[in-house]
Image: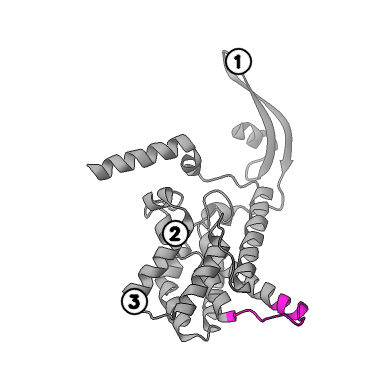
């Protein structure tokens, strides 16, 4: 089908095709319904990952956001979790496997964009909702939680294939991996957060990225970050849907329930051996 269209329409162009496949005993018959040329679509970054220029832009943006954090304990945690080497690793990971940021570097983009959006949303709310009960967001907490909401991805994805989940990622939801990653870093790096600092950070992250959770936000920062992540996810999904980006080869394996159960059973058997 691709070679036929290339000959008829022209090589080096991108087309959005709607078609039906009719199968009989001899051979499949492809019936093309519509062909529309995508004249404005530039697919390089979606399929090949972020360009070096975009990686540099997002990295600079994250460094500037880190510099705005005044709390010494949060700042030390950010310096370790978002070191140069870890930022480079984020530039090689997608933000998800079945939704937003389905490209290498999606994780880096989500880290920067979500935090920037959270600050914007928080500032607008503080300006517009300035009634008698209005309390300004905790900016240090909001920036820290925004920048760290992707920190668990290092253990969530397979080390050798970023478009597959790790064994831990298959067995567990993302949030427990994120929390355990932060706790491990705090212990290994001997970072001392107060009970209030740690409790607030964990609460915001659980409310924002915990998925279906009954946890209620104890500060408005959790509400702001949850809304911002939801906004970014939905808008990014609409962007790549409009660009006709299809999932990378192999992604669907981990979202087929039978295959998923088989993978878990095989892993359990290997560990038992």
Inspect this view and state whether residue 52 appears. Answer: no
- Dot 1 or dot 2: first in sequence order is 1
Q: Secondary structure at mark 1?
A: loop
Query: Label 1: few (<14), some or many (≥20) within 10 Å?
Result: few
Q: Residue 176, which numbered label?
A: 2
Indicate yes or no whether the magenta region holds residue 138.
yes
Residue 16, picture quadrant: top right
Query: Label 3: few (<14), some or many (≥20) within 10 Å?
Result: few
Q: Give the CA distance from mark 1 to mark 2.
A: 49 Å
Q: Residue 24, which numbered label?
A: 1
User: Are the residues flagged by discs 3 and 2 in contact, CB closer than 8 Å?
Assistant: no
Q: What stretch of residues is rendered in magenta?
A: 123-139
- Looking at the image, is 148 positioned above or below residue 161? below
Quadrant including the N terminus:
top right
Tell me how many marks there are: 3
User: Are the residues flagged by discs 1 and 3 in contact, CB closer than 8 Å?
Assistant: no
Indicate yes or no whether the magenta region holds residue 149.
no
Q: Which residue sits furthest top? A: 25
């Amino acid at each position: 089908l691709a070679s036929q269209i290339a000959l008829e329409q022209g090589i080096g162009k991108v087309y959005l095709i709607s078609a039906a496949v009719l199968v009989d005993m001899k051979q499949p018959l492809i019936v093309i319904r519509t062909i529309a040329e995508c004249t404005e679509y530039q697919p390089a970054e979606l399929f090949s990952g972020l360009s070096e220029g975009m990686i540099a832009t997002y990295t600079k943006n994250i460094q500037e956001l880190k510099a705005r954090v005044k709390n010494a304990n949060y700042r030390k945690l950010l310096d370790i979790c978002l070191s140069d080497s870890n930022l480079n690793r984020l530039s090689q990971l997608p933000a998800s496997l079945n939704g937003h940021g389905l490209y290498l570097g999606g994780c880096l983009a989500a880290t920067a964009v979500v935090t920037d959006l959270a600050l914007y949303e928080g500032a607008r709310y503080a300006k517009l909702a300035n009634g008698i009960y209005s309390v300004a967001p905790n900016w240090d907490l909001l920036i820290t939680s925004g920048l760290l909401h992707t920190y668990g991805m290092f253990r969530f994805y397979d080390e050798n294939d970023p478009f597959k989940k790790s064994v831990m990622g298959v067995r567990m939801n993302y949030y427990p991996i994120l929390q355990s990653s932060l706790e491990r870093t705090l212990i290994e790096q001997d970072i001392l957060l107060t009970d209030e600092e740690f409790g607030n950070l964990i609460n915001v992250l659980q409310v924002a990225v915990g998925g279906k959770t009954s946890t209620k936000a104890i500060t408005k920062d959790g509400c702001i970050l949850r809304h911002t992540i939801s906004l970014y996810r939905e808008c990014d999904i609409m962007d790549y849907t409009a660009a006709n980006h299809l999932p990378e080869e192999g992604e669907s394996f981990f979202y087929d329930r039978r295959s998923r159960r088989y993978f878990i059973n095989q892993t359990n058997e290997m560990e038992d051996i």
